[in-house]
């Protein structure tokens, strides 16, 4: 297991290097100039000489290969540079938004798991009954309804029935847990509904397949209690595909909730992505893309290691 984990960690290096090369050079192909947007975007009148001086100050006049080399060296030292728009460190800009997005992702994941596992299991065990049809109806609704639309329904319901809306200002959970949960539980529910639907349907399909395996029939023939057959033998193996979906969905939630964050007026990573792209803030975009890429590779590693925990037949000896 240790050798396998070490090899996977080493493979992350070329993966992240490839992401760095792609994001750096593809951003330079995108039309637009941050200096032009910054100095002339609001109708400001500046001379071309001022534009060139600002480009030189930001290092945009240097050859691309030199810019890339400098960025890679700085990134190896965990220095992602400064935002070209705000002049603040990229790490500071991301950290201010990451806490909110990360907490929403965790809460949505917890909600999805707590609902999806019993729903998917019940639908598989009572296949063809009203329980199965009810779960399938709920999950189809979750897949069909966009998270941002469900979020708007939640906001309108709170406003019309209780004449109340969640607070706008973000409060960290370690400062005031009640104010924090009062604000973030609603976007977590809106996102968690779709998340739950995906995982529940995956568990149902996997469990139906596993329940027809020979070792399940053998366990029943030996007189093992049905609860133990389901929980110890069937469900553990059926959770393997669901674990993959949970991990990928969790990583997507870190930076993919652009519209949902706008509905709930949250200043998360998604909003920061939109702002940085509209401003052509190369350094900030590069930092966020590398953050999401690092999350993906680490989550995939964690998923692979969890396979051995849930399925003892899996061993990583090579």
Image: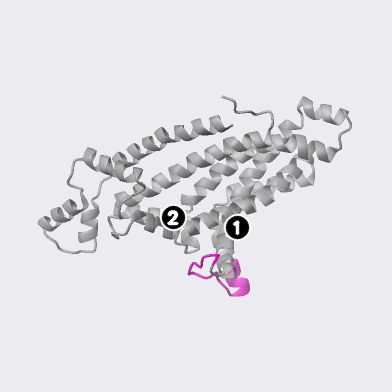
Tally of marks: 2
The answer to which of 154 and 51 lies nearer the viewer is 51
Asked whether, in this view, residue 107 is left or right of residue 204, the answer is left
Q: Which residue is labeled 2 in the image?
A: 269
Residue 60 visible? The answer is yes
Q: Earlier in the sequence, mark 1 or mark 2?
A: 1
Residue under the point 75% across and 35% down = 234
The answer to which of 54 and 186 lies nearer the viewer is 54
The span shown in magenta is 157-174
Position in image of residue 134 (x %, y %): 73, 48
Residue under the point 86% across and 34% down = 224
Task: Return the mark for residue 189.
Answer: 1
Position in image of residue 106 (x %, y %): 57, 53
Residue 128 visible? The answer is no
Residue under the point 29% across and 44% down = 71
- Toward the bottom, the furthest residue is 163
Select label 1 or label 2 by which is in front.
2
Q: Quadrant of the N terminus?
A: top right
Residue 163 belongs to magenta span: yes
Label 2 crowd (10 A; few <14 / some 14-19 / many >=20): many
- Toward the right, the furthest residue is 223
The answer to which of 24 and 30 lies nearer the viewer is 24
Task: Return the mark for residue 241.
Answer: none
């Amino acid at each position: 297991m240790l050798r396998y984990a070490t090899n996977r960690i080493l493979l992350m290096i070329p993966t992240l290097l490839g992401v760095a090369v792609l994001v750096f050079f593809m951003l330079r192909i995108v039309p637009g100039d941050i200096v032009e947007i910054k100095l002339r975007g609001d109708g400001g009148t500046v001379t071309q000489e001022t534009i060139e001086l600002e480009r030189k100050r930001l290092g945009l006049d240097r050859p691309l290969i030199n810019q890339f080399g400098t960025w890679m060296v700085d990134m190896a030292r965990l220095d992602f540079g400064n935002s070209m728009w705000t002049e603040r460190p990229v790490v500071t800009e991301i950290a201010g938004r990451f806490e909110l997005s990360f907490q929403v992702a965790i809460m949505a994941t917890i909600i999805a798991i707590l609902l999806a596992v019993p729903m998917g299991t019940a639908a598989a065990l009572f296949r063809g009954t009203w329980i199965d049809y009810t779960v399938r109806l709920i999950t189809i609704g979750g897949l069909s309804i966009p998270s941002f639309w469900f979020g708007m329904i939640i906001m309108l319901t709170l406003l019309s029935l209780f004449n109340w809306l969640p607070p706008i200002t973000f409060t960290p959970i370690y400062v005031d847990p009640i104010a924090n949960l009062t604000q973030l539980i609603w976007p977590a529910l809106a996102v968690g509904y779709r998340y739950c639907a995906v995982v529940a349907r995956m568990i149902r399909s996997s469990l139906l397949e596993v329940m027809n395996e020979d070792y399940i029939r053998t366990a029943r023939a030996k007189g093992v209690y049905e609860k133990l057959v389901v929980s110890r033998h069937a469900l553990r193996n059926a959770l393997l595909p669901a674990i993959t979906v949970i991990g990928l969905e969790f990583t997507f939630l870190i930076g993919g909730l652009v519209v949902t964050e706008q509905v709930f007026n949250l200043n998360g990573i998604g909003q920061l992505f939109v702002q940085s792209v509209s401003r052509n803030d190369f350094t900030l975009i590069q930092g966020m893309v590398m953050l999401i890429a690092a999350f993906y590779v680490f989550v995939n590693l964690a998923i692979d290691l969890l396979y051995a925990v849930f399925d003892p037949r899996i061993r990583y000896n090579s």
